[in-house]
Image: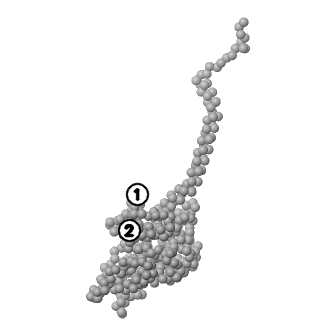
């Protein structure tokens, strides 16, 4: 008996189209699961990366942006990155004027752990500014991370009698940087700036001799500001009434111009930050005769043209008189520091050369 029609089993022979459709229907749920897992994994990795970036990479990249700002302007004061805020300075460069304060601040600002104020604020030496209060002062600071050190520079802090106490009242544990150079050269440099300002304003130029020599006595004019600012021992003595020498570092301005990385390394140790500003960060400009900052693209960033201006020719007898005048003050300064500079090494006491 032939089998009934209803009992025959029929098998569908898959065509290429049917096979593809069926396979797609069978595997679609599996592929969807893979896609979901992949998307979730990528999302988790992205969140992890963002968290790690904020914890580690953001600090480095942000400080590069902050320090990349032009220090002669005030761009960095307005660059507000996540986790940054304006802070009262933990360190001040208090002087001395015309001893290399601008170069020192610019070189320190290379360091990723330092944020420098681009302009002199005259908060502690100007009564009008001081009366505006700490809030006014803080708002003029650059944004910084918690672990960064904010540094402000105003050279006149050194010589103004009200400054030490005011700084102490704000922060008795603050660190202070004093940069000095040969007082004779500093005095002449001070006059050079004074003379240039007169030229720019088209005003009469007063000869150096008329300012530095007292016409009645023929001796050094002690009341001349350029001379007064160079008597370091008197100014430091006022600061030591409020701060210990452990809180003050003395930077050699003459050495800073010849090998800046060495003096900056001393400041790095003083501030307890990593040694970052090495010799590779500088390039010597043959035309201008001093070191500039080497950028990452190997170009150079130099101080403004007003820095390193040529000194006027001063008569030798005036130079010798200045050396003799500063000699006892220098010796007292050396004793206070328990450290000597070479300022008194070449004093010529030959009376014939003074005539």
Along the horizontal axis of the image, is 29 left or right of 253?
A: right
Quadrant of the drawing holding the C terminus:
bottom left
Find numbered disc 1 in the image and state the secondary structure of the residue it sits on.
loop
Q: Earlier in the sequence, mark 2 or mark 1?
A: 2
Q: In this rendering, does residue 106 appear at all?
A: no
As drawn, which residue projects farthest toward the bottom?
216
Name which residue lies at 44% across and 79% down.
Answer: 338
Pointer 2: residues within 10 angstroms few (<14), some, or many (20+)?
Answer: some
Find numbered disc 2 in the image and state the secondary structure of the residue it sits on.
loop
Q: Is residue 113 above or below residue 196?
A: above
Name which residue lies at 63% across and 38% down.
Answer: 33
Image position, residue 44 (x, y; %): 60, 47
Task: Decide which of 256, 197 is in the foreground and name it.
Answer: 256
Identify the disc placed on residue 259.
2
Q: How many marks?
A: 2
Discs 2/1, front: 2
Quadrant of the drawing holding the N terminus:
top right
Q: Residue 291's quadrant in the figure?
A: bottom left
Q: Which residue is mark 1?
A: 297
Image position, residue 28 (x, y; %): 63, 33
Image position, residue 172 (x, y; %): 56, 76
């Amino acid at each position: 008996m032939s089998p009934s029609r209803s009992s025959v089993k029929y098998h569908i022979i898959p065509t290429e189209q049917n096979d593809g459709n069926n396979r797609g229907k069978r595997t679609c749920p599996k592929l969807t699961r893979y896609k979901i897992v992949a998307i979730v994994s990528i999302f988790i990795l992205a969140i992890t990366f963002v968290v790690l970036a904020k914890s580690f990479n953001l600090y480095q990249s942000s400080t590069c942006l902050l320090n990349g700002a032009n220090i002669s302007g005030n761009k960095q004061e307005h660059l507000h990155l996540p986790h940054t805020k304006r802070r009262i300075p933990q360190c001040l460069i208090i002087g001395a004027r015309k001893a290399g304060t601008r170069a020192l601040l610019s070189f320190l600002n290379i360091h990723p752990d330092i944020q420098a104020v681009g302009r002199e604020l005259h908060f502690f030496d100007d009564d009008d500014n001081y009366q505006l209060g700490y809030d006014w002062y803080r708002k003029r600071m650059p944004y910084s991370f918690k672990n960064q050190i904010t540094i402000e520079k105003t050279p006149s802090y050194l010589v103004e009698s009200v400054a030490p106490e005011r700084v102490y009242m704000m922060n008795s544990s603050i660190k202070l940087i004093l940069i000095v150079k040969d007082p004779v050269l500093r005095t002449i440099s001070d006059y050079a700036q004074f003379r240039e300002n007169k030229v720019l304003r088209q005003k009469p130029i007063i000869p150096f001799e008329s300012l530095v020599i007292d016409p009645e006595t023929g001796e050094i004019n002690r009341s001349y500001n350029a001379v007064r600012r160079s008597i370091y021992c008197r100014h430091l003595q006022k600061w030591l009434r409020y701060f210990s020498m452990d809180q003050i570092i003395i930077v050699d301005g003459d050495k800073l111009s010849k090998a800046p990385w060495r003096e900056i390394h001393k400041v790095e140790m003083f501030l307890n930050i990593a040694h970052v500003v090495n010799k590779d960060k500088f390039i010597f400009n043959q035309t201008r005769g001093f070191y500039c900052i080497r950028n990452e693209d190997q170009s150079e960033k130099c101080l403004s043209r007003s820095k390193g201006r040529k000194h006027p020719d001063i008569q030798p007898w005036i130079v010798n008189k200045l050396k003799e005048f500063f000699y006892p003050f220098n010796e007292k300064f050396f004793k206070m520091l328990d450290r000597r500079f070479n300022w008194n090494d070449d004093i010529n006491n030959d009376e014939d050369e003074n005539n």
